[in-house]
Amino acid sequence: MTAGPEAFDPRFSLPAVDAPPLTEVGVILLGLDAARLLAGLGSAGTAGDPAPVALAVDEARHGVAGRPAFADLVSSGRERWSAARGELAAADPASTPSAAPRRLFASAMDTVAGAGLGELGLAERAYLAACWVRRDEVDAYAADRPATGQEDGNVVSDVTAG
């Protein structure tokens, strides 16, 4: 019996059951804007889990007492990105783009592992991988934006303005 087109819907598919949990975390990181990626990279250090780093970045972004300033995290992330960017490019000179975020993230994690960046915590590797996948946006943000502590929050206004 052959399956008809209704048997498989390519618009939605669940991850493989045996896929590492970090892959799904990576997909979430890929959805963050450049400022949050840089702030996460700036605060990741030797952390073993990227999730608490993302929470700390969000708390800093919202000015929670006791957290470093968001602008300081972004600035630290810019420095880390600047230090790692050349090594990542050398480790992945002809990256092959993919439309599958899980594959992109896995490939970027391999690039980070092969870049010779020394001992990295899991969170730092994950944030570097996400920054590598989104490098055009991260590079533009790192080069053009002052670390004000606020990202553009008016996307809807920009889209609907006309």
Image (cartoon, rainbow, N blue to C red):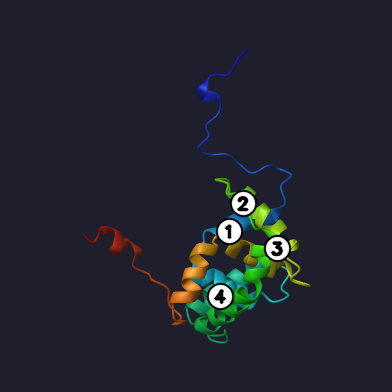
| Disc on the earlier residue, 2 or 3 | 2
Distance Cα–Cα, label 3 vs label 1 = 11 Å
Per the rendering, the mark at residue 133 is 1
Badge 4 crowding class, 10 Å Cα cut-off, few under 14, some 14 to 19, many 20 or more, is: many
The amino acid beneath tag 2 is Leu
Type of amino acid at the residue the image marks with label 3: Val
> Which of label 2 and label 4 is nearer to you?
2
View extreme (top): residue:
1
Disc 2 to disc 1: CB gap under 8 Å: yes
Q: Mark 4 points at which residue?
A: 39
Tell me the SS state at disc 3. Answer: helix
Residue at horizontal 74 percent and vertical 71 percent from the top: 117
Crowding near pointer 2: few (<14 within 10 Å), some, many (20+)? many
Mark 2 and mark 1: Cα distance apart in space = 7 Å
Q: Is residue 126 visible?
A: no
Q: Which mark is residue 112?
A: 3
Q: Nearer the viewer, mark 3 or mark 4?
A: 3
Between residue 127 and residue 111, name the one nearer to us: 111
**Marker count (numbered):** 4
Q: Return the disc, 2 or 4, that comes first in the chain's sequence.
A: 4
Label placed on residue 104: 2
Q: Do the residues bearing badges 3 and 1 touch, measured as CB atoms within 8 Å?
A: no
Element carrying mark 4? helix
CB within 8 Å, label 3 to label 4: no
- Which label sits on residue 45? none
